Amino acid sequence: MSNLGLSPLRGLAKLREAKTRRFSSYDRTGGNDDRFHIEPGKTEIIAEHSGAGIITHIWATLACESDNFLRKIVLRAYWDGEDEPSIEVPIGDFFGMGHGRTANYASLPMQASPEDGKAFNCYFPMPFGSHMKLTVTNEAEHDLLFYYYVDLELHQTLEQGMGRFHAQYRQSRPEGMNDAGLTNEEYLFGGENVDGKENYTILEAEGRGHYVGVLYSVYSRRRSDVWDWYGEGDDMIFIDGEQGLCVPDTVRKPDPRIGPKAALIDPRLESAPGANDAWPPTLHGTGTEDYFNTAWCPTQEYSGPYHGIISAGGPNWTEPVTLYRWHIEDPAIFQKHIRVTIEHGHANRRSDDISSVAFWYQAEPHKPFGAFPEVAERVPTFRRPFKEMKIAVKKARG
C-alpha cells in the first residue's frame, strides 16, 4: 500500500525506502551561535538539494529589531529547477501569524508554539523530483537572526502522481460601498451577489491539483458605534467551469431586517471556454465564519486540527482577525482551473484590509504568481482599539 493511503498513526508501522536528512542553522564551529545572521536586503539559501525527496517538517524562530518584521521577511521555495517560486509568502503569514502578530495555536499541518507563538512549525509534505531550494529574504531595516530546521526524506524516485506544494500570499483593500442612508442591518445583510466577480480572490490556479486550505486575515476599516460583524461574506469556489449542486429553494422566507425576498438566480453555464464563471459556483457557502467551520459571529480564539481562530478580533471585531481552514479530508480538486473566492462582507459591501495565504498541490508548471507586494504595502496599519462595546451593544439592541 502507498504511504499516501495511510493515516499518520497507521502509516508509522510501514517501513520506508528512504533516508532521513536535515538542514539547520547549527553553529558549524561547534559553538552555540546556532542561527543565521541575515543582513537587510540579503537573500540566503537555507536548504538546497539535488535529487528526489520530500520535505517533511520545517521549524523556525526569528528575532529582529524592526517593527512588523514578520511581514518583511519572505520565504520562497523552488521545485525541480523552476525559475518561478512555488512558495512566496511573508514568513509570519506562512506560519499563521497574520498581521505580523504572534499567538499560540495548534492545527494538524501548522502550529505556532510557546513562547507566545514565536516557534513556527509546518508539517505539510513538500515533494520534489530532481531539486529543491528554500530561500529567506530580509526586507527589514535591521539584521535578522534566523534559527531553523528543514527535515526531509531522500528517495531514489518519487511515487507517481505526487503534486508539488504551493503557497501564495495575496492582499487587498477592496472598494466596498458607503453605508450612508442604510440601516446597519441593511448594510451588513442586504444586497445580492449574482456573479461573484467582485469577491476577494484567495487563489486562482491553472492545471491539475487540489486546494488544501487558507490562512485568512481581516482588519476592519469601519468604525461604528453599532454592532459591526465583518464576516457575512460567502465563500465561492469555481472549479473547471462546472456548476455546483443545490436543491430547490422552497423554504426560504423574507428577512424583515432587509425587505422582500429577491428573485432566484437562474443557473448558467460558463460564459466562454475557460472563463470558469458558471453559476451557481461549484462550491457555494453561507458565510465567512461558516466556511471556517465556526458559527454565530465568533469572538473566541480556538484551534483545532482542521480549522481555527488564531486572533478573534477583540471588541466589536475592531482588532486584527486571523482564521484558518484546512481541506485535509475534503480537498477542492481541479483538473483545469480553480478560483477560490470569498465576499468582503455580504454582497461585497465592506472595505476592510484583507490578506491571505492559499495552500495547494498541483502538477507543474504552475501559473506564475505575478508581482509580489512591496514591503511598504505589506506593513499592517492599525487604528485605535474599540473601547465602547457596551454602548455599541446597547444601541444595536435598541
Image (cartoon, rainbow, N blue to C red):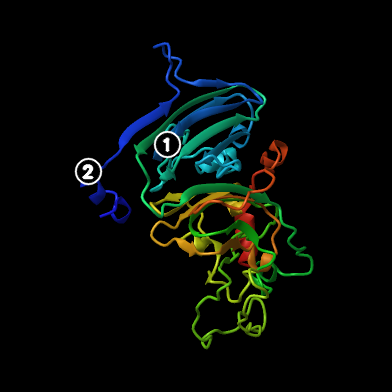
What is the crowding at mark 1: few (fewer than 14 residues within 10 Å), some, or many (at least 20)? Answer: some
Visible in this render: residue 295? Answer: no
Q: Residue at x 71, y 52 (%)?
A: 173
Q: Amino acid at mark 1?
A: Gly
Instruction: Report the disc number at residue 51.
Output: 1
Q: Is residue 357 left or right of residue 379?
A: left
Q: Earlier in the sequence, mark 1 or mark 2?
A: 2
Q: Nearer the viewer, residue 28 or 113?
A: 28
| Quarter occupied by the N terminus | bottom left
What amino acid is at disc 2? Leu
Q: Position of residue 291 (x, y in %)?
A: 50, 62
Instruction: Please indicate whether residue 60 sits to the left or right of residue 74 in the image.
Output: left
363 is higher (above) or lower (below) than 70: below
Q: Position of residue 165 (x, y in %)?
A: 48, 48
Residue 275 as seen in the image, left or right of residue 303: right
5 to 285, vertically: above or below: above
Callout 2 environment at 10 Å: few (<14), some (14 to 19), or many (20+)?
Answer: few
Q: Which residue is identified by label 2? A: 15
Q: Position of residue 313 (x, y in %)?
A: 57, 50
Front tag of 1 and 2: 1
* Residue 337 on image: x %, y %: 57, 63
The answer to whether residue 395 shows anywhere in this view is: yes
Q: Is the residue 228 above or below the residue 254 in the image?
A: above
Q: Which mark is residue 209?
A: none
State if disc 2 and disc 1 touch (CB < 8 Å): no
Given residues 139 and 102, the one toward you in this image is: 139
Q: Nearer the viewer, residue 304 or 258?
A: 304
Q: Secondary structure at mark 2?
A: loop
At numbered mark 1, what does the secondary structure look like: helix, strand or loop? loop
